[in-house]
Amino acid sequence: METGILLVLLVLTGTVILFITERIRIDVVAVLAALSLAWLGLVTPMEAFSGFASNAVIAMVSVMILGYGIERTGITSRLAAAIVTYAGTEERRVNATVSMTVGLLSSVMQNIGSAALFLPAMRRISRQTAIPVSRLMMPMGFAAILGGSVTMIGSGPLIVLNDLLIQADAEPFSLFAVTPVGLALLIAGVALFAFFGDRILPKKEEKKRGPTVAEIWDIDHPIWTCTISPTSPFIGKTREEAFFKLRYGLDLLAVRTYKEITIAPSRHTRLEPGQELAFLGTKEDFERFVSDSGCNPPGTSSRLRETLDGEGYGFAELIVRPKASIVGQSIREIGFRQRFSIEPIVHQSGETETRADFSDTPLTAGDTIVAFGSWDALRVLAGNRDLLLLTHPEVETIHHDKGVRAVLIFAAALLLTVTGVPLSLALLTGAAGMILFGILTPDEVYRAVEWKTIALIGGLIPLGIAMEKTGAAALVATSLTGTLAGTHPLVIMIAVAILATILSLIISNVAATVLLVPLVMLTGAGTGVDPRALALLVAVCASNSFILPTHQVNALLMAPGGYSTRDYLKAGSVMTIIFIGIAVTLIYFLIA
């Protein structure tokens, strides 16, 4: 064996061992692997650092930015709410619903794109359902990878396969030729986590969050909404005349008139037919108001409630500063709602706490006011000279009005990939669009990137380069295929599937396909197995990348899910075996 091949295999072995033992953080291991290859002369210094400018890394950075842009417009909150409404809060049902949706999306778009689209929504679903995020991310990611095998345009290896077949004067596969195999793989992946998720998914301890402001002050009631009917006795009355708080114990948080939402409407706001009102209070108090007012509650969903329940709004504690100009004045006198665009809910002065109407209570230094409003409005109060904001805004600004724009940019970027534009160029163009159209600022773009993931992928790519450059990958492939002559077709197919799987974990799945397809077609011609069947098996199994977090989707979800390499080994090894079994069996009976 040549020295170069021996050295690269030693580096590969050391990298895998460190990945599994986790004695060193995996992103550091990846960078050390790249440096080792350079110092051993197996790759040039330029090749050692080329991973950080590769298509894979640029695509990864871009989808993180695109996903963050989608999240910042509130789209993911609506997506999460729709999934929870349909699937409920039961873990199996949620995972099955999300996985099938993501898998089918991946059949017509890049799997990294579908995973990025759902990543923020999974965080939101985790909070709403109390399901640990570690039990949601991996099933979704595996489904995104599996869905790429449903059509011939769902993954890079399958797209490349037809080009290789044409070059070999073989008949290319039709768009849906692989669909029976891909659907079976997707269904098997969904079923695996549905029936055995408790055994193979990690049980990560979620960081216990402290009590929210609403929980501390015991105002964590649901937000109730209803629409004023034309016959309501409240029509024509102002907010002040309706006595919502005095009569019913309800705080009026917002009013929606057509598409315009007014947070903390003033006491002069007049009630009109068709207006949608949003209240905070108990169910009993709200039902009593509905009975008296003839107000119509919404059906299963309310856009106003979804907006206020979203990440752009919340509760905060404010303290009246010493020597504040508002000391001695009441909420009514200072025009609190008009001035700050937030709704006061609770007032505490010394030991006296008031939850009823305190509009005419004079404010004193040190008084605490608990209020509801948008994080944008509350963030402005951080520099106020009269009120001290104690609660740090939970999220960045949510641009609800830019949701359609963000979705169009995301869709356009993905559409470019379908038309043949390189993935990295298409997605980075979309990421730039997020800045140019005002959805994200440049500083927010930098915060959107998970740099640990980028170091992992960028550091591992030179390992694949060294495998190809030294001939190690070709040696492994030719040695194995050379020993298959005279064996049963199923044995040959299993061996090819295993080889494609192993190589896809080390080098890119497209590179593994390009390397193996010509070799297995020669093997098929010499052993009596249909060469096209072996070629298809290689392209399908090149996506069988579940054991290590080297696939782009697994790398993307590793940090958000809090996963370790061992987590992927445990769940991924089971999925890998099932994948090979289904792929070999179906391709053998349907095509070979």
Image: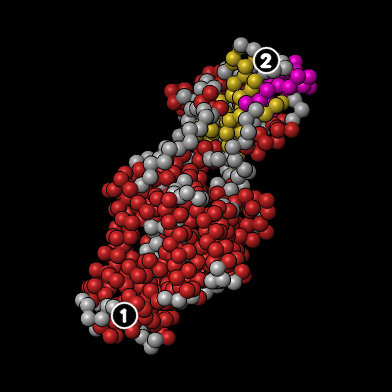
Left or right of residue 145, residue 29 in this image: right
Q: Looking at the picture, does residue 312 appear above or below residue 182? A: above
Task: Mark yes or no: residue 85 visible.
Answer: no
Q: Is residue 324 part of the magenta span, yes or no?
A: yes
**What amino acid type should be assigned to the residue bearing mark 2?**
Thr
| Callout 2: SS | loop
Disc with the residue nearer the chain's start (2 vs 1): 2
- Where is residue 274, by image quadrant? top right
| Callout 1: SS | helix
Which residue is at a point 72% across and 17% down the rendered structure image?
365
Which residue is at a point 57% across and 63% down the rendered structure image?
35
Span shown in magenta: 317-338
Q: Is residue 63 part of the magenta span, yes or no?
A: no
Which residue is at a point 28% across and 60% down the rendered structure image?
578
Viewer-closest of 547 and 314: 547
- Where is residue 186, by image quadrant? bottom left
Query: Are there few (<14), some (14-19), or many (20+) residues within 10 Å of tag 1?
Result: few
Give the residue pinned by disc 2: 361
Give the residue pinned by disc 1: 482
Left or right of residue 260, residue 88 in this image: left
x and y, in percent, of residue 204 in the image:
42, 41
